[in-house]
Amino acid sequence: MKVNVGDIAPDFTAPTDDGREISLSQFRGRYVVLYFYPKDNTPGCTREAISFKDRHDELEKEGAVVIGVSSDPPSSHKGFREKLSLPFILVSDDGKIRELYGAKGFIAPSRVTFVISPEGKVIHVYNSQINPARHPEEALKAIRDDKSKPRS
């Protein structure tokens, strides 16, 4: 399955870095920036996480929650989050969430960000292995653009 702009974001439940389980549906009513990354503590993923951390206050002001997803176990996410003082949720995926969203790469796991509206609709998809630091900027722009559209 591949999720595209205009689709309803598939719900999932997954363990977080702090041992809780969360479901995407619990964030209905807020924007969600759901970003998939290959692996904790690698250069590109660290750069991407720090970029989300640096833009976190702006994203929060726009009403967004950030959720990072990789296949690393909760213990790895916990260390990664503490090491970088990340202010957002990291969830462990056994491959099912990636499968639901079509966020799989040919060789390595894909680096892709989905921006989901408060109504649960995907409003933006950004896929870039090359420039991980741009994902937060793309998410902010998508949210701001969506907020400026009239609601039906």
Image (cartoon, helix red, strand yellow):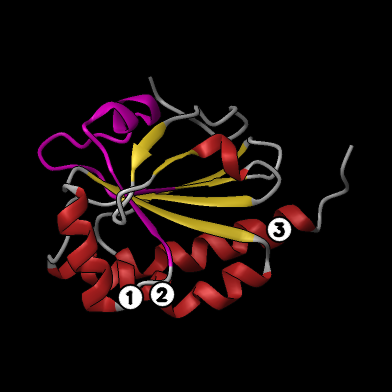
Instruction: Give the mark nearer the N terminus: 1 vs 3.
Output: 1
Observer-side mark, 3 or 2, equals: 2
Marks 1 and 3, how far apart at CA: 24 Å
Residue 22: horizontal and vertical position, in percent? 44, 41
Q: What residue do we see at 26% from left, 38% from top?
A: 93
Q: What residue do we see at 39% from left, 30% from top?
A: 101
Task: State yes or no: discs 2 and 1 in contact (Cβ < 8 Å).
Answer: yes
Task: Say which residue label 2 marks.
Answer: 53
Amino acid carrying label 2: it is: Lys
The answer to whether residue 25 is left or right of residue 44 is right
Q: What residue do we see at 22% from left, 58% from top?
A: 77
Q: Quadrant of residue 135?
A: bottom left
Residue 34: horizontal and vertical position, in percent? 45, 48
- Badge 2 marks a residue whose secondary structure is helix
Task: State yes or no: discs 3 and 2 in contact (Cβ < 8 Å).
Answer: no
Amino acid carrying label 1: it is: Ile
Quarter in which the C terminus is drawn: top right
Q: Is residue 29 above or below residue 120?
A: below
The answer to whether residue 82 is left or right of residue 116 is left
Along the line of sight, which residue is nearer the eye, 131 or 95? 95
Observer-side mark, 1 or 3, equals: 1
Marks 2 and 1, how far apart at CA: 5 Å
Marks 3 and 2, how far apart at CA: 21 Å
Task: Say which residue label 1 marks.
Answer: 50
Q: Residues within 10 Å of mark 3 (few under 14, many from 20)?
A: few
Q: What residue do we see at 41% from left, 32% from top?
A: 13
- Over which residues does the magenta segment extend? 88-113
Q: Is residue 37 above or below residue 50?
A: above
Q: Residues within 10 Å of mark 1 (few under 14, many from 20)?
A: some
Task: Say which residue label 3 marks.
Answer: 145
Q: Is residue 42 above or below residue 103?
A: below
